[in-house]
Amino acid sequence: MGCGWLLEADAVETVWQAGCLKVDALGRMDRFGNLATEIYRVELDGGDILYESESYTAVRHFLEMLTEPYPEYKVA
């Protein structure tokens, strides 16, 4: 699942993590050292990509649907 975008990211930052799930922001560093996010990626611990989107709101919605029966995975 996912869009399969080819992205040569300068930087990857984990923006959310719980249990075996994490959300990484992939993008480029600007001249001030800030990450300009281009894609958000939902991954399992083993590195398997479950979902990719340019929208953090879409990623949150995906995580809420995926983890709804498990309150310990509450999405921030």
Image (tube, helix red, strand yellow):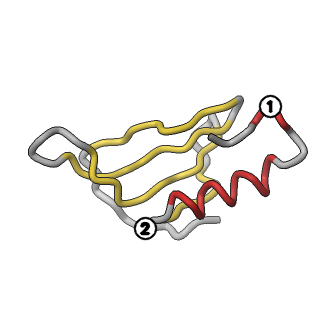
CB under 8 Å between discs 1 and 2: no
Q: Residue 6: which quarter of the image?
A: bottom left
- At x 59% / y 64%, what residue is drawn? 58
- Measured as percent of width and height from the top left, residue 25 is found at 42, 47
76 is higher (above) or lower (below) than 54: above
Q: CA distance from mark 1 to mark 2?
A: 30 Å
8 is higher (above) or lower (below) than 5: above
Location of the N terminus by quadrant is bottom right
In the rendered structure, the answer to whether residue 63 lies left or right of residue 58 reads right
| Disc 1 target residue | 72
Q: Residue 73: which quarter of the image?
A: top right
- Measured as percent of width and height from the top left, residue 3 is found at 53, 70
Dot 2 surroundings within 10 Å: few (below 14), some, or many (20 or more)?
few
26 is higher (above) or lower (below) than 21: below
How many numbered dots are placed on residues in this image? 2
| Disc 2 target residue | 5
Residue type (three-letter) at the residue carrying disc 1: Glu
- At x 24% / y 51%, what residue is drawn? 28
- Measured as percent of width and height from the top left, residue 22 is found at 59, 39
Location of the C terminus by quadrant is top right
In the rendered structure, the answer to whether residue 57 lies left or right of residue 54 reads right
Hey, which residue is sitting farthest right in the picture? Answer: 69
Q: Which mark is residue 58?
A: none
Residue type (three-letter) at the residue carrying disc 2: Trp
* Element carrying mark 1: helix
- At x 58% / y 50%, what residue is drawn? 42
Mark earlier in primary sequence (1, 2): 2
Dot 1 surroundings within 10 Å: few (below 14), some, or many (20 or more)?
few
